[in-house]
């Protein structure tokens, strides 16, 4: 019985569909059209939903670090790197008698000390670090007060002998002595001048000598330095420094464009034979007590340790100052009338030791 019922039900269902096919087609058509309409409405007429974007994460870029700047402790000038700021300082004694002029190498010295060597004749202690001229001279002998000044710079010292007191000190093992007497291969005698005004050297030779002796760096306190800027109304455009006599007295004319002082000596421009007129950034009249004493003959004695008065010329200005030096190896410190240390302009500093009583300094 079961097997007969199933076909009858299926046949009846097929028959029912055939009878009602028009209605079914209409219903399914209606449903299809309605569905299609609804889908079209959703797709084309519904307001789009705004997509909410996640807030952008701001990545802060760290600013690039400022490049490290290195300065020469001798001159305050910018140098290439740390090694250049620590390279060895070399002091060279240079003659200043009329037969020695024009000298070579002086314009590139970082610091120059000028003082009477004997009989009113001045001599220069020149100190070099980053600048290395290849012709320097004439090289002459050493005096005790120059040792006092160079000791603060941890410098080698090139010279041709010296006074008994200075040689005893410089040869005691505490200094970097590169005396021509014991290092003749690092010096030579020029043929266009006569002895004793003809001993020359170069940094090619002196650097090699320093390296051979292990004098490759210098550690010292230089002068306090600053960037120079001409003042609006200069107070000192013409400077006269009298040390001994007309042949050795010096004068300076201030140039605001370069902020330097053009040096004259004995009434004529003081020239470096290879580099032209000498033009320091700072000129200092260092007032000192000076006397003549009997050592290995009559010698000048200058009191370098202690304190005294000074006049500093820079930026077109004259500054009344005091100087002090606590010991041989301590640096000279310059202070103003308010006891504040004076910053010196970057560049060459020229220091003239002016004897109290017999010397003088004036400006306008």
Image (cartoon, grey):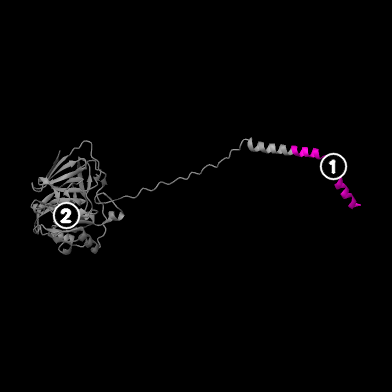
Mark 1 surroundings: few (<14), some (14-19) or many (≥20) residues within 10 A? few
Compare residues 324 and 225 and report the one nearer the observer.
225
| Mark 2 neighbour density, 10 Å: few (under 14) some (14–19) many (20 or more) | many
Disc 1 target residue: 16
Q: Quadrant of residue 142?
A: bottom left
Looking at the image, residue 250 lies above or below residue 202: above
Between residues 252 and 364, which one lies in front from this camera angle?
A: 252
Instruction: Tell me where the magenta segment starts and ends, as one range.
Output: 1-30
Q: Quadrant of the C terminus?
A: top left
- Where residue 10 appears, as percent x and y from the top left, is 85, 47
Identify the mark nearer the N-term, 2 or 1: 1
Let me know if residue 4 appears in the view.
yes
173 drawn magenta: no
Residue 146 has which mark?
2
What residue is at 69 percent from the left and 36 percent from the top? Answer: 37
Secondary structure character of the magenta stretch overall: helix
Badge nearest the viewer, 2 or 1 = 1
Magenta span contains residue 8? yes
User: 129 or 358: which is nearer to us?
Assistant: 129
**In this view, 196 is above or below 24:** below
Helix, strand, or loop for circle 1? helix
User: Residue 281 in the image: x percent, y percent?
Assistant: 21, 45
User: Mark 2 falls on what kind of element?
Assistant: helix
């Amino acid at each position: 019985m079961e097997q007969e019922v199933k076909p009858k039900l299926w046949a009846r269902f097929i028959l029912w569909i055939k009878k009602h096919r028009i209605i079914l087609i209409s219903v399914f058509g209606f449903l299809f059209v309605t569905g299609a309409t609804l889908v079209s409405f959703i797709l084309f007429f519904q307001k789009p939903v705004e997509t909410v974007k996640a807030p952008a994460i701001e990545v802060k870029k760290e600013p690039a670090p400022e490049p490290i700047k290195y300065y020469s402790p001798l001159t305050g000038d910018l140098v290439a790197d740390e090694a250049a700021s620590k390279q060895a300082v070399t002091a060279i004694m240079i003659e200043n008698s009329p037969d020695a002029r024009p000298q070579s190498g002086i314009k590139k010295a970082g610091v120059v000390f000028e003082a009477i060597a004997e009989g009113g004749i001045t001599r220069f202690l020149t100190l070099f670090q980053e600048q290395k001229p290849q012709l320097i001279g004439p090289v002459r002998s050493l005096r005790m007060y120059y040792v006092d000044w160079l000791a603060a710079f941890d410098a080698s010292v090139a010279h041709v002998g010296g006074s008994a007191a200075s040689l005893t000190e410089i040869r005691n093992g505490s200094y970097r002595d590169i005396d021509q007497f014991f290092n003749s291969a690092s010096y030579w005698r020029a043929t266009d001048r006569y002895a004793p005004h003809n001993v020359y050297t170069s940094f090619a030779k002196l650097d090699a000598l320093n390296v051979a002796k292990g004098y490759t760096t210098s550690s010292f306190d230089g002068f306090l330095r600053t960037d120079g800027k001409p003042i609006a109304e200069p107070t000192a455009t013409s400077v006269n420094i009298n040390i001994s006599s007309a042949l050795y007295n010096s004068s300076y004319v201030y140039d605001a464009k370069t902020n330097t002082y053009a040096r004259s000596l004995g009434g004529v421009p003081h020239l470096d034979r290879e580099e032209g007129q000498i033009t320091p950034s700072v000129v200092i009249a260092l007032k000192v007590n000076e006397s003549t004493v009997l050592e290995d003959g009559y010698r000048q004695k200058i009191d370098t340790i202690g304190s005294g008065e000074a006049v500093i010329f820079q930026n077109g200005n004259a500054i009344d100052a005091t100087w002090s030096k606590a010991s041989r190896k301590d640096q000279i410190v310059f202070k103003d009338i308010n006891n504040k240390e004076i910053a010196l302009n970057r560049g060459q500093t020229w220091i003239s030791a002016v004897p109290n009583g017999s010397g003088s300094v004036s400006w306008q």
